[in-house]
Image (cartoon, rainbow, N blue to C red):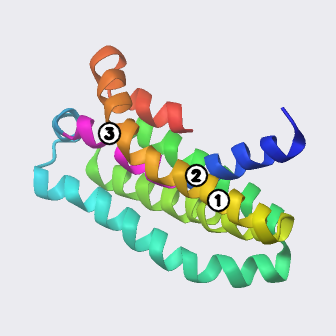
Amino acid sequence: MSTSTGNLVLLSGLAAIGTLSTTIILPSFPAMATALNAGADEMALTLSSFFIVFALGQLLVGPLSDRYGRRPLILGGLTLFVLGSLLGAWASDLNTMIAARVTQAAGVCAASVLARAVARDLYDGPLLAKALAFIMVAMAAAPGFSPLLGSLIDSQFGWRTSFVLVA
């Protein structure tokens, strides 16, 4: 695999992990609700809190990466995402799960936003167009296959395994 191809695969993975981490748990909501002693309306808070923090985080990531660099924000964001994912795997109540999802979103927004910024840093012209198209395909594919993957994981290993997998 060439360096350019390796970069594209890495950038595509970074861009898609936010969507993957959201949609992979959707088939597990009934089992999660039972384990966390929460209703369906309360489980919706795990999604809305994720999306709110993810959206607001995107407003901060760009300027911070211009000031401190892309790499520290991506690595710090991924570290925060892994910690949030592990917290989600061990959550025993709804409040802990919401905190886990907020932590995941705060971390993963850096990877998602900066994947495209790094592509613009590395490529220009037709290569940039090709790189961004590749990244967008990965982002579009993630919500298509991740619920199936989440359903398989949930049925075989339990919902907590999905959080461990994305970590």
User: Dividing the image into 4 quarters, which one contains the C terminus?
Assistant: top right
In-image side of 156 versus 125 (left or right): left
Q: Residue furthest top?
A: 156
Residue placed under numbered mark 3 in the picture: 92
In-image side of 83 versus 94 (left or right): right
Q: CA distance from mark 1 to mark 2?
A: 9 Å
Residue placed under numbered mark 1 in the picture: 111
How many residues crowd around disc 1 within 10 Å: few (fewer than 14), some, or many (20 or more)? many
Task: Please name the amino acid that badge 2 sits on.
Answer: Phe
| Residue 81's disc number | 2
Q: Secondary structure at mark 2?
A: helix
Task: Please name the amino acid that badge 1 sits on.
Answer: Ala
Q: CA distance from mark 1 to mark 3?
A: 28 Å
Task: Point out the tag, 2 or 3, that comes first from the N-terminus.
Answer: 2
Closer to us: 18 or 68: 18
The x, y position of residue 59, in whole percent, is: 57, 83
User: Residue 98 lies in what quarter of the image?
Assistant: bottom left
